[in-house]
């Protein structure tokens, strides 16, 4: 038997625990599966729950291919996430489908966000309210395999597109039958090359990929034809790459069978875990005139229309944390994606970092494509290259077909 004093203490403790449990709130967070992103979010959730013991965050992730379908089905049914991750290019679709709600202006005042974040996030703003905010942003850079560079006697990464072709030629290897066994350069519109084509190569050849705030296709031009001829010429003319080599460009680079690879800053975390791969990174090559361009994008977090009452209040708190300076530095360290605030990204340590620096510096001359349907627009460019590679269609003809198809997609979306 417990003494009366201990009985009272035990009863009080039980009452307190019962009260805490009764007041506890669980919210759901959804994102697509990418190992480094999941690891980073696990760390953020641990930190948040330690600071907010009355809130539990349950994370669920899905393969990228299934992600949008799962979100679209769950929220209207009153299920799924309270806070959801979405690609910036999907914002209009999520708003139109009533899947997300605006961020509360008292906690996320537009003027403060405009001041604190990189300007690209303003695509998430409608009037004086933001619908979503990123923890991190992305840009492109050129990864290179240092071991293959050393074997080929290459002193350093290319500064220009001409040097890119020259170095790739030194690294490329083929067997006795002429089959590619080691690529000088990866290639594939199914990865990040469709961004490289649009926002970098077309501009470097003197063109503008789109007009009218990305509502009008403009790459069906001499500059666009030159851009796609340079790109496919890596396979057909210079023979330093092959479409479909190891299926995915990043797979060939991670396997140590490609000398150079254009990818986003999000790839850093994965490459850091690849054993035996000695790699470096540099800014995207300039054209002959020394002009550099880049592409920037980002994923954002938003509060869904499912979140109500105490779950909504908890979701707002969680949004505050995942858009904080602390969260952005963790995301940079774990994933390699760039902080969405200059206060974190432009510190001396980050801007001059040997790995992060090229990506961060690339933000200064980056453009952000405003997609109507990112997957559909990417597929159109994949088809364009396939017609040239398999059917031998001339560049001018294939790019005209692509431009017509993409313009039709844009017209249907914006009508």
Image (cartoon, grey):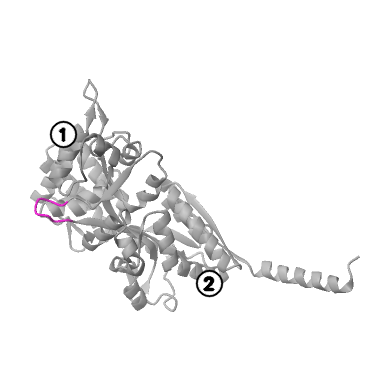
In the rendered image, residue 393, in percent from the top left (x then y), is placed at 14, 36
SS type, badge 2: helix
Task: Give how far apart the Cα atoms at labels 1 and 2 are.
Answer: 57 Å
Q: Is mark 1 on a helix, strand or loop?
A: helix
Q: Residue 146: x and y, percent? A: 28, 41
Circles 1 and 2: CB atoms closer than 8 Å: no
- Which residue is nearer to you in this view: 69 or 274? 274
**Up-down relation of residue 313 to residue 173 (above or below):** below
Q: In which quarter of the image is the N terminus?
A: bottom right
Residue 240 visible in the displayed image = no
Q: Is the magenta stretch mostly helix, strand or loop?
A: loop
In the picture, the quarter occupied by the C terminus is: bottom left
Which residue does the numbered mark 2 point to in the structure image? 313
Is residue 124 shown left or right of residue 362? right
Residue 50 shows up from this direction: yes
Q: Is residue 248 magenta?
A: no
Q: Mark 1 or mark 2: which comes first in sequence?
A: 1
Residue drawn at x 15%, y 55% is: 203
- What's the mark number on residue 236? 1
Mark 2 crowdedness (10 Å alpha carbons): few <14, some 14-19, many ≥20: few
């Amino acid at each position: 038997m417990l003494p009366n004093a201990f009985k009272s203490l035990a009863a009080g403790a039980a009452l307190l625990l019962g009260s805490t449990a009764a007041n506890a709130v669980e919210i759901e967070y959804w994102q697509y599966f990418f190992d480094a992103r999941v690891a980073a979010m696990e760390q953020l959730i641990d930190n948040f729950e330690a600071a907010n013991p009355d809130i539990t965050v349950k994370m669920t992730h899905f393969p990228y291919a299934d992600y949008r379908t799962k979100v679209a089905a769950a929220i209207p049914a009153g299920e799924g996430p309270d806070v959801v991750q979405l690609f910036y290019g999907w914002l209009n679709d999520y708003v139109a489908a009533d899947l997300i709600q605006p961020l509360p202006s008292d906690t996320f005042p537009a003027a403060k966000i405009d001041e604190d974040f990189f300007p690209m996030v303003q695509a998430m703003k409608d009037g004086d309210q933001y619908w979503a905010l990123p923890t991190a942003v992305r840009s492109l850079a050129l990864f290179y395999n240092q071991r293959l560079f050393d074997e080929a006697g290459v002193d350093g990464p290319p500064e220009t597109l001409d040097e890119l072709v020259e170095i790739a030629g030194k690294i490329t290897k083929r067997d006795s039958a002429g089959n590619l066994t080691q690529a000088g350069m990866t290639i594939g519109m199914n990865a990040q090359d469709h961004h490289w084509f649009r926002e970098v190569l077309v501009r470097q050849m003197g063109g503008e990929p789109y007009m009218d705030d990305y509502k009008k296709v403009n790459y069906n031009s001499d500059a666009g034809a030159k851009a796609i001829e340079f790109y496919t010429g890596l396979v057909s003319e210079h023979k330093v790459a092959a479409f479909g080599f190891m299926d995915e460009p990043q797979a060939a680079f991670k396997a140590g069978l490609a000398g150079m690879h254009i990818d986003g800053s999000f790839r850093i975390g994965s490459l850091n875990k690849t054993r035996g791969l000695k790699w470096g990174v540099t800014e995207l090559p300039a054209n002959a005139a020394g002009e550099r361009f880049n592409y920037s994008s980002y994923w954002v977090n938003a509060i869904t229309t499912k979140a109500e009452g105490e779950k909504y209040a908890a979701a707002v708190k969680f949004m505050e944390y995942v858009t904080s300076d602390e969260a952005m530095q963790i995301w940079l360290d774990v994933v390699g994606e760039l902080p969405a605030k200059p206060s974190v990204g432009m510190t001396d340590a980050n801007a001059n970092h040997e790995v992060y620096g090229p990506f961060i510096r690339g933000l200064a001359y980056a453009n952000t494509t405003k997609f109507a349907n990112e997957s559909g627009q990417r597929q159109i460019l994949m088809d364009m290259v396939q017609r040239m590679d398999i059917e031998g269609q001339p560049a001018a003809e294939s790019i005209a077909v692509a431009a017509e198809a993409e313009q039709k997609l844009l017209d249907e979306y914006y009508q």
